Image (cartoon, rainbow, N blue to C red):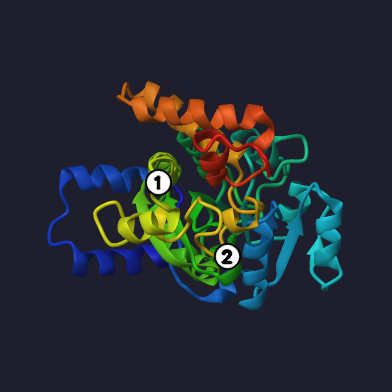
Amino acid sequence: MAACRSFRLRSLLSLHKCIPKITSSSLSYFSWTRMFCSSSSPSQFQAVGFIGLGNMGSRMANNLIKAGYNVVVHDVNHDVMKKFSDKGILTKNSPLEVAEASDAVITMLPSSAHVIDVYTGPRGMLNSGNGLRPWLFIDSSTIDPQTSRKLSATISNSNLNGERGGCDTPAMLDAPVSGGVLSAETGSLTFMVGGSEEAYRSAKPLFLSMGKNIIYCGGPGNGSSAKICNNLAMAVSMLGVSEAFALGQSLGVAATTLTKIFNSSSARCWSSDTYNPVPGVMDAVPASRNYDGGFATKLMAKDLKLAAESGKEVEAKTPMTFVAEEIFREVCKEGHGTRDFSCVFRHYFSGKDEF
C-alpha cells in the first residue's frame, strides 16, 4: 500500500506519545487507513474547489475566500456562478474541470444522486484519464452512509497524477454540517467528519475556515451516519414542541407563556429556545417571516427517508422516524416543501394553512 513516508515518521512519533500499547484491534484499524499527510500548512491547498453553491455552499465558499484560499467553483445555476465570477473568483463549467484545477475539492449537494453524478458522472471529478489532481475530497452533503463509503473506497483506490501534499494516494472525508444558513454565513458550522483520522487532521484548516465545531466520528460513512441521527432527533424534537404549542394554545395558554415555561424547565430544547416554530414569539427565525428561508421541509423529509432506510439495513427499531417522515411528507404534499421545516406547526398542528 502506497504511503506518505514523511508523514509515517511523524505519525508514529505522535502515536508513541498518545498510545501506550498498540493492540491487535488497533492494528486492524491502521491496516485499512492509508497514511496521509497531516501538516496543517495552508500551502497544501494552493487551490480549493467548491461544487454546489446553494444557500449553504455559497456561504461556505465565501468563508474560504475570506480565509485567503484560492477558490475554484462550479454550480448548475449559472446566475450563482456569475455572482462569484463578478467578484473575481475562478469558475468552471464542470466538476471535472474543478478537479483538474484543485488540490482539494469540497462538495455541498442536495442528495446522494447529485453526489454520485458529480463524482462519477460523464463530467465527474473521478473521470480524469491521467489520475487525480486533488489529494483530498470532502463531501459535506447529507447523504446515505453507504454512498459515502462506496465513494471513499473508489477514491482511495485511485491514483494521483503526481505527489500532492507529500502523499501519493487521495482520500475522501464525508463531513456533513449542522447549524443552518446563519451558521454558514458566520462561519460557525458544526462538521461531523468520517474518514481516516490522518485526512481529518489535514483538512482541519479548511474546516476551521467554515466552522467552529469539528467533530471526528470515525471511519468512512460515520459522518453521514451522525448527520442522519442528528436530523432525526431535530425533526422529532420539532414535532413534539409544535404539538405541545398547538395543544397549549387550544387549552388557552399563550405561546409566549408556554415558551417561558419550556425554556426554564425540562422541556427546553433547540426547537423551543433557538428555533421557535410559533409566529410572533421569536425574532430572526423562519416563523417570524412566514417560514421563508431556513431548512426546507422537503430536505427534512429526504433526511428522514435516509434515516428510515439506514434503520432497516441494520434492523433498528425506528418508530419515531416512520411517524416523522409521514408527517413531513404530508406537509410537502400540501405544497409547503420549500418552506422551513418548522412550518409543520402552522400547517400540520395548528390547522392554519395560509402563509
| Residue 321 as seen in the image, left or right of residue 63 | left
Q: Quadrant of the C terminus?
A: top right
Kindly identify which numbered label has been placed on residue 167. none
Image quarter of residue 307: top left
Q: How many labels does the image show?
A: 2
Q: Do the residues labelled 1 and 2 touch (CB within 8 Å)?
A: no
Residue type pointed to by label 1: Gly
| Residue 336 as seen in the image, left or right of residue 307 | right
Image quarter of residue 158: top right
Residue type pointed to by label 2: Ala
Nearer the N terminus, badge 1 or badge 2? 1
Residue 165 position in % (x across, y down): 54, 65
Of badges 1 and 2, nearer the viewer stands 1
Q: Is residue 310 above or below residue 72?
A: above
Image quarter of residue 61: bottom right
Q: Residue at x 47, y 73 (%)?
A: 40
Element marked by disc 1: loop
Residue at the far left: name it. 20
Q: Mark 1 points at which residue?
A: 252
- How busy is the neighbourhood of tag 2: few (under 14 within 10 Å), some, or many (20 plus)? few
Kindly identify which numbered label has been placed on residue 284. 2
Q: Is residue 231 above or below residue 256?
A: above
Q: Is residue 135 visible?
A: no
Q: Quadrant of the N terminus?
A: top left
Element marked by disc 2: loop
Residue 344 position in % (x across, y down): 53, 39
Residue 99 position in % (x across, y down): 70, 53
